[in-house]
Image: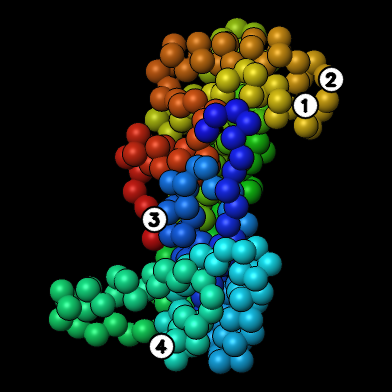
Amino acid sequence: MESGELLMKRSVFFISDGTGITSEALGNALLAQFEKIEFERITVPYIDDEEKAHALVKRINESARMNGDRPLIFDTIVKKDIRDIVSQADGFMVDIFGTFLNPLEQELQSSSSYTVGRSHSISNESNYERRIHAVNFALDNDDGARTRQYNEADLILVGASRSGKTPTCLYLALQYGVRAANYPITDDDLVDQQLPSALRAHRDKLFGLTIDPERLSTIRNERRPNSRYSSIKQCIHEVEEIELMYRRERIPFMNTTAYSVEEISTRIMLTTGLRRNR
């Protein structure tokens, strides 16, 4: 988009008779392709009876009247009678389940169960518990807090402070059931350029994160403004020395600057060969 070019604006409703997570995920994936349009996103979960459906229609119609354009509607409503009510709204409706379930039913020669909330239900209790245990493990082993549990880890993320280790560990735990610990590489670790002793026995589990120094400085300034910790000089020093350590110790690593936590996690899974534990 050229400088000074005005963004178009459009309202978007993500609606569901469940949590709305699926409609948000699929809808946002499609909307990401339209960079010149600014979207006002509204998520409305648990539209599971006719009264709620009629109230939602009024809300959508009011949005259309106020903004002058009909809103986009991404829905994952299972019940046809409720979906029929919502379809009367003054909006452009993308029926996600209807679009995909009907062809699948024909191909599989089987009827869908049409169960509300099925995509996010606890269908396998042991798998659900495994992910919760993985989240607890990530929290217990955050920031080098408990190195004695590293023998239980599937993965140990290392890198400079504020390079994205903690959110990545939590996402890996919640999404993939991976027991991920993280260890911050500090100035003390860089003095002799030796791998910290707590990590040496677990070299095969290590994966490094790095980040552009300018971005790192910006992030650190939000936490400790105008400090040595957040200075660009310190950030450049740490990043250069840590990347040198990665290369010398043959630790696989990636630059997180341009990636979301979802992309970082996916690339880690692909690079390390870790399997989804669920």
**Looking at the picture, how far across and down is residue 211, in whole percent?**
56, 24
Residue underneath mark 2: 226
Is disc 1 in contact with disc 3, using a CB cutoff of under 8 Å?
Answer: no
Q: Is residue 53 above or below residue 142?
A: below
Q: Which amino acid does label 2 sit on?
A: Asn
Instruction: Between residue 251 and residue 110, name the one nearer to us.
Output: 110
Residue underneath mark 3: 277
Closer to us: mark 3 or mark 4?
4
Q: Is mark 1 on a helix, strand or loop?
A: helix
Instruction: Between residue 114 and residue 207, name the one nearer to us.
Output: 114
Q: Which amino acid does label 4 sit on?
A: Lys
**Looking at the picture, how far across and down is residue 205, in whole percent?**
43, 34
How many neighbours does mark 3 have within 10 angstroms: few (below 14), some (14-19), or many (20 or more)?
Answer: some
Q: How far apart are marks 3 and 4 (CA)?
A: 35 Å
Q: Distance between the residues labelled 1 and 3?
A: 37 Å
**Mark 4 or 2, nearer chain start:** 4
Residue 124's disc is: none
Whether residue 149 is visible to the viewer of this picture, yes or no, is: no
What coloring was used for the rendering? rainbow
Q: What residue type is labelled 1?
A: Asn
Residue underneath mark 1: 221
**Looking at the picture, how far across and down is residue 25, in whole percent?**
47, 58
